[in-house]
Image (tube, rainbow, N blue to C red):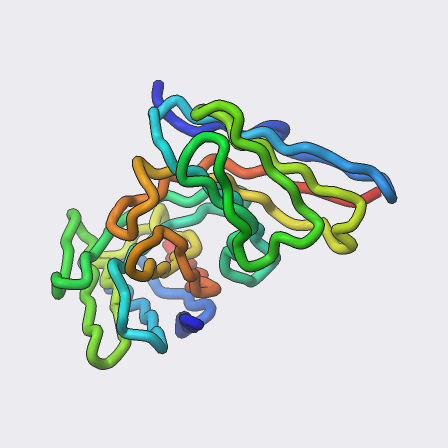
Amino acid sequence: KQEVTQIPAALSVPEGENLVLNCSFTDSAIYNLQWFRQDPGKGLTSLLLIQSSQREQTSGRLNASLDKSSGRSTLYIAASQPGDSATYLCALSGYGNNRLAFGKGNQVVVIP
Amino acid sequence: DGGITQSPKYLFRKEGQNVTLSCEQNLNHDAMYWYRQDPGQGLRLIYYSQIVNDFQKGDIAEGYSVSREKKESFPLTVTSAQKNPTAFYLCASSIGGQGWQTQYFGPGTRLLVL
């Protein structure tokens, strides 16, 4: 069974600093990995999806990398803003189905 | 606007009562999913459906039931057999049931027990 771990569980950074969020997983036989954002009491918004054959994806200030051999993914948010305050969830899908295995999330607070 | 709607936003359940959470999508997606989220926890899959009139159990299906009579709708019933139903419930959909397809999420329903 796929186990997904996100460290740290919570962090605070001053505005302008770069954010680095980590996701590790136990089974490297994945189809893709997604990073989601969740605001308090809200649903999830997909940020980036990395196929298993890819090493990274970028969207604006966000960059996500994937290293299947070491079972790790990193979400990098450049020049953080107070609006980046949210919980970031990592999720992986296996081959043949779209069942996602989620981590518990990284709760981020960006201090103005 | 295309998207996923869930209703109600808050739902209260009395002891021994069955309650139904609504999920509707107008994205023309074949696959739909129900997840449960507890405080400080990741999402856990309850049920999923890859096509109309078909659905499969997820990791925590006990005490829940679903139906998929229409492509647009995937209601979840929380039965009295679910002894700890207090949680945030999220519905999602994707174009199909393959692993490369992004899931899109609704705004969620928070279920509380009276």
Residue B19 quadrant? top right
Q: Where is residue B62 in the image (x, y as percent from the top left)?
A: 67, 54
Farthest residue, direction front: B53
At horizontal 31% and vertical 57% (from top left) the residue drawn is A15
Q: Where is residue B2 in the image (x, y as percent from the top left)?
A: 35, 22
Q: How many marks?
A: 0
Quadrant occupied by the N terminus of chain B:
top left
Front residue of this view, candidates B48 and A66: B48
At horizontal 30% and vertical 55% (from top left) the residue drawn is A96
At horizontal 27% and vertical 74% (from top left) the residue drawn is A28
Front residue of this view, candidates A83 and B18: B18
Report the side of B6 relative to A52 (left or right).
right
Quadrant occupied by the C terminus of chain B:
top right
Q: Is residue B83 visible?
A: yes
Front residue of this view, candidates B110 and A108: B110
Front residue of this view, candidates A83 and A42: A42
At horizontal 27% and vertical 56% (from top left) the residue drawn is A80
B102, above or below B71, in the image: below
B49, above or below A98, in the image: above
Farthest residue, direction bottom: A70
Farthest residue, direction right: B15
Q: Where is residue B44 in the image (x, y as percent from the top left)?
A: 53, 57
Q: Where is residue B67 in the image (x, y as percent from the top left)?
A: 58, 33
Q: Can residue B35 be seen in this view?
A: no
Residue A90 quadrant? bottom left
B18, above or below A38, in the image: above
